[in-house]
Amino acid sequence: MKFISKEWFYALCIFLIPLSVGMDLPGGASISFPGELMLAVLAGMVAFQILSNPLSYKKLLLHPLTLLLLAEFIWMLISSFFSELPMVSLKRVIMKGIFLTSLFVFTIQWAEKDANKIKYLFLYALGLIIPVVYSEFRHYWLGMDFLVHVSLCKPFFDEHTIYGAAIAFVIPFVAVAAGNTQSLGIDKKYRLWIFALLILLVAGEYFAYSRAGVLSLMSSVILYFFLKLNLQFKHLLIGLAWILSLTFVFRSEIYSFTKSVSYQSNTADVGEHLLSALNLDNNVSNLERVNRWKCAVRMFEERPITGFGPGTFQFVYGPFQKPDEMTRISTTKGDKGNAHSEIFMSLSETGLPGLLLNLILIFTVIGIAMRAYYKSKNIVAKKVVMAALLGFVTSVVHGLFNSFLDQDKIASLVFTSMAIIVTVDLSTRENKIADEKNL
């Protein structure tokens, strides 16, 4: 198959992922169709290409971010050998391998052209139009009732938090494009449509009523101004260290404050809805997250090195719950989701090495993206890498409260963003070497 055919197949795949719906398979398995099926086909094509000509992938495979992703994948594979549920872990490892191959490796190839870097901004966003319009039409039909917002995005998204996470990730992409149409070389006739798309996505995020989604967007805006002030990665690390230090020093006061907060999340008042994230007194959603996080820590204490195996948390955490920490939505059947945190998920499923690799990967992505943004002389690459970084940060913040990386809806955004960052970083370094040779 010619590369151009794979290129169009890839573009169609990314566009269709937000439109994919869950389908049950024989044996109790399920698949997001057609997204995951198309990704599997694309992964097979890329794997064949790598095996046929491995030397052409040398630069990509030796990039620090690629090496970290491979290390994380290898540790995930190792931890699956010690898994409590080997078949569950094996399926999770295979899916991660498909994501890495199709979404990361192929995107790096695909985005070498500046025109494709710009298309990358819109493929998923355009695919989101139908789910957003569909969800808001249903919302309007039901009288804009706040209490029914959770499942309005079905069948495209399972519930409002992953729906809000996807929109939050994409908004920075479209916002960057809307604010830089001329420098990105976007035709004037499309500019009004880009602004209309941005307004639609912002409205979709607002009516998704996802606290983590809004908080992640706020973090993205803060990082945007951070970049505009030309602050460096080390300044970001210092700032985060200060925040963590102050949180640790005043942890008792912070906990007492959260126990006094009475705001509830089941309200249409946006301010109260956001402030309810601080309520650890009687907000069931928050208390259940804390319950899961504590279970994850207990699981880590029992298996600190290998964890219980990739994908196993929701099936094995039940016995680690304590009666006085359980809520009315707690379960011991493994049918109500995972650890609600990428951090605690890694800790419980792949142990301390898995968590450390996950954290190192996050900061490496941010550090490389900031370096590429500051050093790139290609205006298109510069704007696109900023958009990729801002989107990636929304997923990092969301990952503190939810865990969606095992699903194609979010994995497609995270891995393609990392691929874009690697692409720009490689081209920036190559251009720098070329300039030094010409001196």
Image (cartoon, helix red, strand yellow):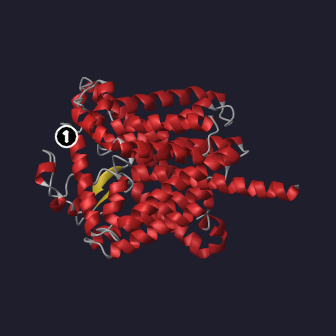
Q: Amino acid at mark 1?
A: Val
Q: Residue furthest right?
A: 439
**Residue 64 shown left or right of residue 13 in the figure:** right
Residue 138: x and y in percent read 29, 30
Instruction: Judge from the rendering whether residue 307 lies leftward or rightward of residue 226; answer left or right.
Output: left
From this view, report whether residue 197 is shown above or below residue 306: above
Look at mark 1 in the image and give the residue it sits on. Answer: 284
Task: Indicate the quadrant containing the N terminus: top left, top right, bottom left or bottom right.
Answer: bottom right
How far across and how far down the image is residue 208, in percent? 34, 34
Q: Name which quarter of the figure residue 265 lies in.
A: top left
| Residue 299 in view (yes/no) | yes
Mark 1 surroundings within 10 Å by alpha-carbon count, few (fewer than 14), some (14 through 19), many (20 or more):
some
Tell me the SS state at disc 1.
Answer: helix
Question: As drawn, which residue projects farthest toward the front?
Answer: 249
Residue shown at 49% from the left, 54% from the top: 362
Query: Where the C terminus falls, by quadrant?
Result: bottom right
Name above or below for residue 330 compared with residue 284: below
**Considering depth in this image, is 324 or 93 the residue closer to the camera?**
324
Image: 283 above or below 237: above
Identify the residue at horizontal 58%, vertical 70% (top origin): 49
Question: Foreground residue, 156 or 405?
Answer: 405
Name the one closer to the observer, 19 or 224: 224
Instruction: Count the marks.
Output: 1
For the point 17% across and 56% down, which residue is it?
321
Give how far across and how far down residue 226 sits, in percent.
57, 37
Q: Position of residue 182 (x, y in %)?
A: 68, 31
Q: Is residue 92 visible?
A: no
